[in-house]
Image: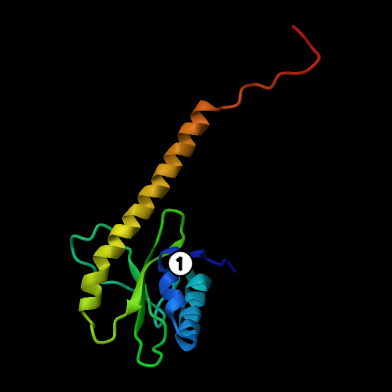
Amino acid sequence: MRKWTVVTTLIDAWIASLDDDEYDSFIAALGYLRDNGPAAGRPYVDTLTLPKNALYKNMKELRPPVVNGAHMRVLFAFDLQSKAIMLVAGDKAGNWDGWYTDNIPTAQRLFGEHQDAIRQEIAELEQRNKTTKPGKPRRKGKKK
């Protein structure tokens, strides 16, 4: 069974701040995402309802089980390389609608920057391949 790549770099500080129970809950949800990829669904993953003007429509949220009243959420999206990029994380308890209003624009911006970096890397590789195409190898020891 394929394991999907999940990148947590942007939320590593948040992960480090979790207590043991919260961390275990987060890791369980992350494991579910890693096992199921884009097909992951409730209870651990849900599709976000985004504003009509949202540039990236494929945003999702990781929904670890509630621990000690903490309603942890992680906004993420699958990138051009089919990796799940964790973008913004936090506890939405007590700020049910406001949490999304505050964090979706940040997630959109971070994902755009990430996608742009991938496109730039691809363009550089393509350019490098165009300028360094191998020629026909020369045979050693024979002169024409």
Seen at 49% across and 86% down, the residue is 20
Query: Which residue is most to the bottom?
Result: 68
Of 53 and 19, the residue lying toward us? 19
Query: Where does the N terminus fall, quadrant-wise?
Result: bottom right
Task: Specify whether 89 is left or right of 22.
Answer: left
Seen at 50% across and 32% down, the residue is 128
Query: Where does the C terminus fall, quadrant-wise?
Result: top right
Q: Quadrant of residue 74?
A: bottom left
Q: Up-down: is 26 above or below 21?
A: above
Of 54 and 8, the residue lying toward us? 8
Seen at 60% across and 26% down, the residue is 134
Query: Which residue is most to the left?
Result: 52
Of 40 and 31, the residue lying toward us? 31
Q: Position of residue 44 (x, y in %)?
A: 41, 80
Q: Up-down: is 10 above or below 29?
A: above
Q: Position of residue 108 (x, y in %)?
A: 29, 61
Q: Is residue 57 in view from this perspective?
A: no
Task: Specify whether 97 is left or right of 113.
Answer: left
Q: Which residue is mark 1?
A: 8
Tell me the kind of residue under disc 1: Thr
Seen at 42% across and 71% down, the residue is 13
The figure's colour scheme reads: rainbow
The total of numbered circles placed on residues is 1
Q: Residues within 10 Å of mark 1 (few under 14, many from 20)?
A: some
Of 123 and 46, the residue lying toward us? 123
Q: Position of residue 77 (x, y in %)?
A: 38, 64
SS category of the residue bearing label 1: loop
Q: Quadrant of residue 132?
A: top right
Query: Which residue is most to the right?
Result: 141
Q: Position of residue 22 (x, y in %)?
A: 44, 85
Q: Is residue 40 in view from this perspective?
A: yes
